Amino acid sequence: MTKKTIAVFFGGRSPEHDVSVVSALQVMSALDRSLYDVVPVYLATDGRWWTGEALMQRESYLPSPEVLATLTQVSLDMSANGRPTLLSPNASMFNFGKSAKRIEFDAAIPCFHGLVGEDGQIQGMFETARVPYTGMRTLASAVLMDKVATKRILAGADIPQLPYCEIQRPREGMLVTASELAPIVGDLKGPWIIKPSHLGSSIGVAKVSSLEELADVLPEIFKYDTAAILETFVANMVEYNVSVSRMSGELTTSAIERPKRTDELLNFKEKYLSGGGGKKTGIKGGAKAPGQQASEGMLSLTRELNPNIAHLDADIRRWAGLAFDQVGGTGAPRIDFIGNEETGELWLNEVNPCPGSFGYFLWEAAPEPLLFSEMLDKLIQEALFQHVRGRLPPDPTPSDARLFLRR
C-alpha cells in the first residue's frame, strides 16, 4: 500500500498550547512509519505556522531563534483543488519557482486543546480547504468546547447534569460585584464550582462559598475566557472518564478510569507535571512507539483503570454513547462524569473533543484493547471516509438554480 502523508497540527493561540505540543509529540511518535510519513505543523503562540524536522523533538520547544532558523514558515492552501497543500510564503498557485515550497499531504491530525483549535475553528478551516481530518466535526467541536452549549444540547438526552448558571464577562473591564451576581446566581445554592466555559486542563477552576468569593475569582477567569459556568459543588466527589468512538464502525467505549486525587480539585500541575520535584517530562518525538507509556508527565497522576463499579458501568457507557450520538460524533472524545461517592449520584461533567494524549491509555485498557498506533490508523481511515462522504460535485449549484452562464 502506498504510504500516506499525515500532517499533525498542534500548538496554537490557546492557554493549553503546551499540552497540545505534548500530545502532538506523542501522536507523531506513535504513528506507524511503515504506513505514514509525518509532517509536523506547529502553530506558534504569535500565530505563525512552522514545519521542519526539529519539531519532532521535545528539546525544540518552545522554538528558540536558532531552531526557528531551521524551520519553514507555511500556510494552508485554501483553494481546495487536488491534495491538501502547505505553502511557504513565496508559494502560491501562480508561483512555482525554485523559491516556492509546496508540501502536499493526505490527511490532518489536529492535536489542539482548548481555544482556537479544539473548538471548531481549525475544523471549519479544514472543511473549507477540503482537508480530511481526524476527530470531531466543526459543529460538534464548537458545541462541546462550550460547557454551557453542551448542557443545553444534551438537556433532552436523558443524561443527568448538575444545575448551573452562566456568567458573561462584562462589556468593559473584568469586575463583577457581588450585588450584580446575586440575580444571575438566583436560587442556585452554594458552595459552587466556577470554571471557564471554553477551557480544559482544569485551568481557572475554583471552589467558592459566597458571592464575594465568586466576585474575587472571576477577573482571573475572564482573562482567558469570555464566559464562566457556575455549578453546584459535589461533596465526596469522585470522577469517572471514558472515551467513546465509532472509528471501527460501531459505537465502542474504552476502559473507564477513576483518577485518584489528593485534593478537592484536580489542578493543572497535577495533570501535566511529574511528581519528581515538579520537573516537566515527556517523550521525544520522532520514534515509533505504539503502546508505549508515551508521556510520564501526562500519566504521572495515579489513576485506576477499569475500577470495580458494576453498579455504574452500564450507565456511564450508555450516557457517553448518548452524548456522542447527540452531536453526530466522530473521533474519540473523552466523556467526563462526576459523582457523590457516598450517595451514588452521578452527573455528566463535560466532553473533551480532543483529550490530552488522545486518551490512548484508555483504549489500550479497553475490553477490546487497541494500541495507540492502531487507534491513530483507525482515526485516519475514519477521516478519509468522512471526507469522501461529504464531498460535493465540482459545481454544487443545481442547474435550475444557476443565475450565471457556465463557461
Image (cartoon, rainbow, N blue to C red):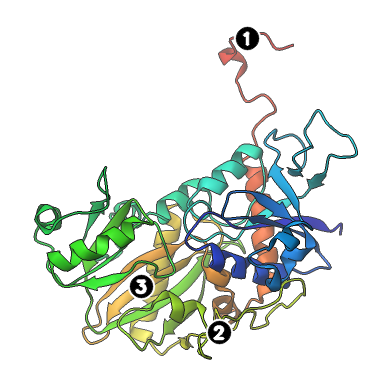
Residue 278 in percent (x, y) is at: 51, 85
Q: In the figure, residue 372 lies in which quadrant?
A: bottom right
Does dot 1 land on a helix, a strand or a loop? loop
Question: Visible in this render: residue 157?
Answer: no
The part of the image, by quadrant, that contains residue 317 is: bottom left
Q: Secondary structure at mark 3?
A: strand
Q: Secondary structure at mark 2?
A: loop
Location of mark 2 (residue): 279
Q: Which residue is mark 3?
A: 337
Q: Residue at (63%, 49%) from the top-left corner?
A: 48
Numbered disc in front, either 2 or 1: 2
Residue 259 visible in rendering = yes
In the image, is residue 343 above or below residue 33?
Answer: below
Residue under the point 51% across and 90% down: 277
Q: Position of residue 254 (x, y in %)?
A: 52, 75
Most distant residue in the right direction:
98
Q: Earlier in the sequence, mark 2 or mark 1?
A: 2
Report the front residue among 387 and 129.
129
- 117 displayed left or right of 188: right
Measure how far apart labels 3 and 2 are at the Cα level: 29 Å
